[in-house]
Amino acid sequence: MLNGEKHIPRPLRWAMIGGGRLSQVGYKHRSGALRDNTAYQMVASAFDIDATRGREFGVNLGLAPERCYDHYQQLLEEEAKRDDGVEVVSIATPNGTHYEITKAALNAGIHVICEKPLFFTSAEAQEIKALAEAKKLIVGVTYGFSGHPLLMQMRAMIANGEIGEVRMVELQYTHGFSANDSADKFSEAQKWRVDPKIAGPSFVLGDISTHTFYISQLVLPQLKVKSLLCDRQSFIPSRAPLEDNAMVLMHYDNGAVGRMWASSINAGSMDSQSIRIIGSRASLEWSDYNPGELKYEVQGQPNQLMHHGMPYLHESALADERLGALHTEGLAESWANIYLKFAIAISATQRGDQHTLDNLIYPDINAGLEGVRWIENCVRSADNGATWVNYQ
Amino acid sequence: MLNGEKHIPRPLRWAMIGGGRLSQVGYKHRSGALRDNTAYQMVASAFDIDATRGREFGVNLGLAPERCYDHYQQLLEEEAKRDDGVEVVSIATPNGTHYEITKAALNAGIHVICEKPLFFTSAEAQEIKALAEAKKLIVGVTYGFSGHPLLMQMRAMIANGEIGEVRMVELQYTHGFSANDSADKFSEAQKWRVDPKIAGPSFVLGDISTHTFYISQLVLPQLKVKSLLCDRQSFIPSRAPLEDNAMVLMHYDNGAVGRMWASSINAGSMDSQSIRIIGSRASLEWSDYNPGELKYEVQGQPNQLMHHGMPYLHESALADERLGALHTEGLAESWANIYLKFAIAISATQRGDQHTLDNLIYPDINAGLEGVRWIENCVRSADNGATWVNYQ
Amino acid sequence: MLNGEKHIPRPLRWAMIGGGRLSQVGYKHRSGALRDNTAYQMVASAFDIDATRGREFGVNLGLAPERCYDHYQQLLEEEAKRDDGVEVVSIATPNGTHYEITKAALNAGIHVICEKPLFFTSAEAQEIKALAEAKKLIVGVTYGFSGHPLLMQMRAMIANGEIGEVRMVELQYTHGFSANDSADKFSEAQKWRVDPKIAGPSFVLGDISTHTFYISQLVLPQLKVKSLLCDRQSFIPSRAPLEDNAMVLMHYDNGAVGRMWASSINAGSMDSQSIRIIGSRASLEWSDYNPGELKYEVQGQPNQLMHHGMPYLHESALADERLGALHTEGLAESWANIYLKFAIAISATQRGDQHTLDNLIYPDINAGLEGVRWIENCVRSADNGATWVNYQ
Amino acid sequence: MLNGEKHIPRPLRWAMIGGGRLSQVGYKHRSGALRDNTAYQMVASAFDIDATRGREFGVNLGLAPERCYDHYQQLLEEEAKRDDGVEVVSIATPNGTHYEITKAALNAGIHVICEKPLFFTSAEAQEIKALAEAKKLIVGVTYGFSGHPLLMQMRAMIANGEIGEVRMVELQYTHGFSANDSADKFSEAQKWRVDPKIAGPSFVLGDISTHTFYISQLVLPQLKVKSLLCDRQSFIPSRAPLEDNAMVLMHYDNGAVGRMWASSINAGSMDSQSIRIIGSRASLEWSDYNPGELKYEVQGQPNQLMHHGMPYLHESALADERLGALHTEGLAESWANIYLKFAIAISATQRGDQHTLDNLIYPDINAGLEGVRWIENCVRSADNGATWVNYQ
């Protein structure tokens, strides 16, 4: 169980790029990074495209005004001059800037934690992966739901054969907040998401389904997609070619099949993301709506409902527990868990602790790359008339 | 509200073919037909391939021994000789016999109520449809879940524009009772379902998804499938070419899209069938697990949960109510409702009451034909490598 | 599993007194009694205080007009003259008439099935019990929810020690349909329920909590209430002294405690009746809202959800199954189950089959008497300032 | 919406007394206080009765070793000598020490945030209240569940008449973690809870029901308990006279009634705390198991389910929102919200900002006092044979 005690020798000096006052996700980064003040200390920022608003915001969060920079280039430049300069930056800007900022940060010798989808193309991701390896720097990706402890329980139970052989993977991340186009016009947070120049080749596939796809990889590390078919729609025509709804079928290398449904037009739906893994003797199902519950359904037996924090869980699920049974954990705990793992990875890198790196499970550059590949394959299929494509 | 009072001048003389002691569905037919004793009276039977067992069973249900026949041909022949012979038969035999029995009954001037899937081919269904029309006889199809009153509520709300324009149709009928192959070997009820000679061209597509597909047509009478893609699997290899899992994508003529998932290998799942209709402003969702509940989710408003029997429902939903609010209705009420409508249709036909026939909504020969077409299109797609096919 | 086959040599000749066209519960009696046509045949009636309406109703249900009587006295008198006269009557009239009709029927040598609460006083119930014993006739009481199969599962699991020693009994039957007084004025079904002359000494205690109290006795036959305290309210003042809300505390003879909440002013609540039995190692919980589910919660283990019709259930729970797993059973199946047991008891009495009578579990005259005692004790406590009274 | 920006001029210098490595609640205090680093900075501690363990723990959390004190007296003494000494302490020690530590801290001029139940007697609470007023210091009480935003929604809806006149208050906080006595013997956290010398006059009434009672006062500020009756049990006899189960009935001054059930022997239950307020036209229901949901059930209308973060909520509910709709908030957000309000109150006190103090709703000394009175009245009733007592 986690209680805030340090897992690394000292907190890392951390800065945020993007994620300012108008950003909803920015607060999740800060809540995750600063949960215990033993993994990170926030020392600098370039929060906002409006530099004045960004500086005011940073000061209101307790930053020194002189370390609230106007833009990321200035941040990298000025912090490089300091002995106590930032060691790691989090990037919470619109998709279209991830690649250049990540590259610049790595080239400045700074570790990176970046929003999903990581980049526009897997070529970019491969390039950055090589750069990070050359520089011996970490790139973490904020698949922010993936830190829920019961996902480690799913992973352990599947690995232990508790559901038998995997047959089907049922994935869903849908909501209805873009059922009409009002936000497309008036919300800063939504406008760029439906603009291919800034969002990249997809809307909901990149914006939300990458989360669920990563979770499927987290709990099923042994399974690989072999081929897929994606059918995508733009129910609000002005969003085309970007999709507000997508339905994907998958074939895995072991003979299992899968489905993904990603949507922002699922009007009225409030239970957004779920994953069900069906095996030959049982199924496991989890939803981020009630992230502290895990359904374990053995064919022919009473259905079981597992709860976070209970002693019957696997060690790996209890390791990330924070509040304990009966006490509801939410999305903030999930973010805190992945941010802690980023810190452990960065610190291990700094200290050359390869053993720790080899045993740490977290959304790294490979997870980011896989997300980009997932989008690429989906878009390729969709743009080819919703036909089957080999996963590449 | 229904309370058992007669809707037709006198009960119809009814017989069952199949559905004997070992049949689970047979009891649903009897519970549906005989709910109020004002729509049908059971007067004869050919319950079983084991004639002795069938006769004993019929006698135990109160039939005269001499009207418990050895096989359906004998039933049709002998009853034809009586002044008080059967007017309508229900067919609850394995799929492969539906066509011949239905044809023989119609030719004997007897109305037919038949299990789904109706026949093996749409050509057979077209032929029988023509025969029934020529003979002025009814063919009803026991889509047994389709009589739940809240489905009429869905139909009315969609027609009234309460969800806006329809965008997506999400359908599911899955369970895990065939997750392994033990029943394939030992259960009489299961053996023939995985034998193409008796089951026809599909297993789960015909056995279960036809129910859900009909429900989608019931609530969305205005929408037509334009093209579909079906990917089917036989996780128990001995079932091939029949599928125990199928995933279908659909395109509708109005631009809406849809999905169907049919499975008998969804291990541990107990909430089998659900339908969600997503419109431009709201969604409606219903499941046969809690058939007295209907979710109405308007984007941007609190989610609503409607309950059967409540005065706020549409007249058409209250017309089929039997037990009243707070009192759980189950599958037997749904069967009773469709059986009552079959009786009203048959009686109207007998009396030449075209007005009643024109205004009655129930699973008729066209619904049966559509179910067969659904299977045919799915199988054609699946056998063509899970590719898109025009719906025909 | 039940499939309609006969459990007694021939159907009993049955009549209804009350429960006519305006009665919601009348249809439940008929649905229960006539489910399979192998336990009862309806041959006569005195359905309604409006004799013309009652006769028309009876004819519409298929009765011979001459056996649709004007009132119960006429029914008893005329049927006594027939060789094929009624053997058993069901009484679904307002409470205040139960005693006189039951007495008259028994004196006419006719078995009785009567609505709850059985009578106004336990003295009346004792008198009728003696009369029934003297006449060797059955008095069954329609605790209509008590036939759900999973209640037999609860009983078996508790008897087998699967929850440990019983510590607490948590009972609830509440709804909000009398939150205001409009029905008191305009609904025939509600008016008499708040009139002490017709309803007796209680409203919700008698009208609804007797159901739940009987269920607690069904699943906990070994436990006896030792003392109780009842606090009752009339939130609609015109209902006083009859309560529309009551809260009861109980002490059992083994040291266990209990609570009951009965209410008709629980505004907006639609999940009316539930029972939770807490033992030293586990709890069992059941609700009539989802009567096919049973929660089994062992402390320190994943919560379990059991489903009706599954092979893992106790034999006694499967014996009353009708539709099978995945197929929703509702209140009508529960009524059919208790009506079948009434028929088995009556037939066994007729045939002098004491063994069957000794092993049959159903709501008999003792269960009816206990319900009246429950109300008496509650009212005595409430009228004494909501103080503890010894249960007597 | 809260995003971490400062609400007070500078973070308060804060220390913890108790709540060290073995304490589960200690981490909740830290997660609450340090959520945003703009309300508090942790500068000192006396974490543990084992001083060495406590110091090591404090250092691991980032404290300076010299400010990790051996015991609270030392902390108060040494910090008083510093210009940058602590301004506010949180007390997370066993109940029996709350009074003396609070008194000492106030006398040292330090604001106090203290665990529930605040003290053993209301006389102590009255004394401390007078002392705090005299010293112009804040005493906050960590009713840690009371910061969930939807509780403010309940308060606003009730105040606006959206449920009509309040009739019944249904309260529950139960779990099964003390169903047996193993933890009584082996768990440090449990041992003292069943020892009257350290726990005070109650176990579950104080330990858990005070949370729910405070929530009832938060949402119903206008209602006062007039009289109550408490029946308590010690199912594990060694716990006597402290109860592991208690059932309370209440009468309110407006004629409403209420119930509370507190239990630690509700075997297997995982959905611990719930509150339902029943009005003359509608009910509101909330549970900490799904704290982002609020049920609004208007009699005669579809049931409504409200979700946190949605624009249709009242301003006061949105003011405390942190993560936004679709993103699960848990107990940590609730703690952060009340800790922020404590900080705002303390800062306002320091700055003499009476307007802020007058308009701030949070669990203050009066809320702590009411919790102690609640226990006193319950115990008085229980010890008097579970009889009605006037609330005093």
Image (cartoon, coloured by chain):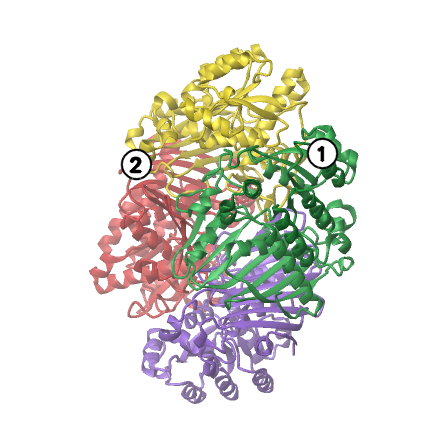
Chain colours: A yellow, B red, C purple, D green
Q: Which residue is mark 1?
A: D81
Indicate the quadrant containing the C terminus of chain C: top left, top right, bottom left or bottom right: bottom right
Q: Look at the numbered discs 1 and 2 and tell me whether their residues touch, using CB distance below 8 Å.
A: no
Q: Amino acid at mark 1?
A: Lys
Can residue C316 be seen by looking at this rendering? no
Check chain identity for marks 1 and 2: say if they share one: no
Residue D191 as seen in the image, left or right of residue C370:
right
Chain ID of residue with mark 2: B
Binning the other alpha carbons within 10 Å of mark 2 as few (below 14), some (14 to 19) or many (20 upward) gives many
**Circle 1 marks a residue in which chain?**
D
The image quarter containing residue C29 is: bottom left
* Coordinates of residue B380 in the picture (x, y in percent): 36, 34
Q: Position of residue A303 (x, y in %)?
A: 58, 47
Residue at image position (54%, 70%) is: C246
Q: Residues within 10 Å of mark 1 (few under 14, many from 20)?
A: few
- On the image, the x and y values in percent for residue A268 come to 39, 43
Task: Label 2, secondary structure: give it.
Answer: loop
How many angstroms separate mark 1 from mark 2 (CA)?
85 Å
Task: Using residue A297 as the reference point, say whether residue A102 is left or right of it.
Answer: left
Quadrant in the picture for the N terminus of chain C? bottom right
The nearer-to-camera label among 1 and 2 is 1
Q: Toward the viewer: D84 or C152?
A: D84
Total label count? Answer: 2
Position of residue B78 relative to residue A281, above or below, is: below
Say what secondary structure mark 1 lies in: loop
* B67 is higher (above) or lower (below) than D105: below
The numbered disc on residue A136 is none
Give how far across and how far down residue D44 sits, in percent: 69, 34
Q: Which mark is residue B391?
A: 2
